[in-house]
Amino acid sequence: LIDSLENPNPQIFHSNIRDRKKDDYISLAKIEESSLNKREIIDSLEVFDVIRHINDPEHPLTLEQLNVITVDQVEVNDSLNDIKVKFTPTIPHCSMATLIGLSIKVKLLRSLPRRFKVRVVINPGTHVSEISAE
């Protein structure tokens, strides 16, 4: 199995961002639906909290632990209902880049209020086929 991994020994990063307690977590989409005329403001830390625990398709680690996503790579414009997430594959020829991008996008579309347009892109210069993976 190890011989078939593209990156058999990835570098692991540790986050200094506090994890929410499980009791604190409620789907952001449900919060908005339950608030009739209230509109909750969503920020980059909240979006990052939704995607930080997505598992890497090749390793038993999260995208955050592999530094594929960071809070600095999440851009939120709440007033324009726009979210852009950049991610960095662990290696420039990662064949899982499209799957990682799709996983991030699906998780956000299922978790955030429907008013948001979600864009997920590869950080420029970090993948050999970054355009085709968008």
Image: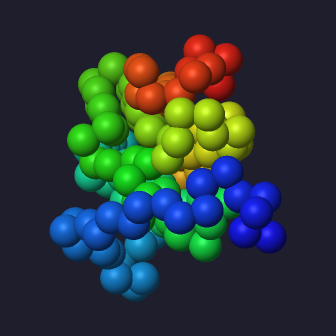
Q: Position of residue 5 (x, y in %)?
A: 71, 58
Q: Is residue 13 visible?
A: yes
- The residue lying furthest to the front in this view is 3
Q: 29 or 74: which is nearer to us? A: 74
Q: 80 or 100: which is nearer to us? A: 100
Q: Position of residue 88 (x, y in %)?
A: 44, 39
Q: How is the image coloured?
A: rainbow
For residue 16, above or below residue 109: below
- The residue lying furthest to the top in this view is 131
For residue 89, above or below residue 62: above
Q: 77 or 32: which is nearer to us? A: 77
For residue 17, above or below residue 73: below
Q: Position of residue 4 (x, y in %)?
A: 78, 59
Q: Position of residue 14 (x, y in %)?
A: 29, 69
Q: 27 or 45: which is nearer to us? A: 45
Q: Quadrant of the C terminus?
A: top right
- The residue sitting at 44% across, 48% down in the picture is 68
**In the picture provided, is 70 more to the left or to the right than 126?**
left
- The residue sitting at 19% across, 68% down in the picture is 16
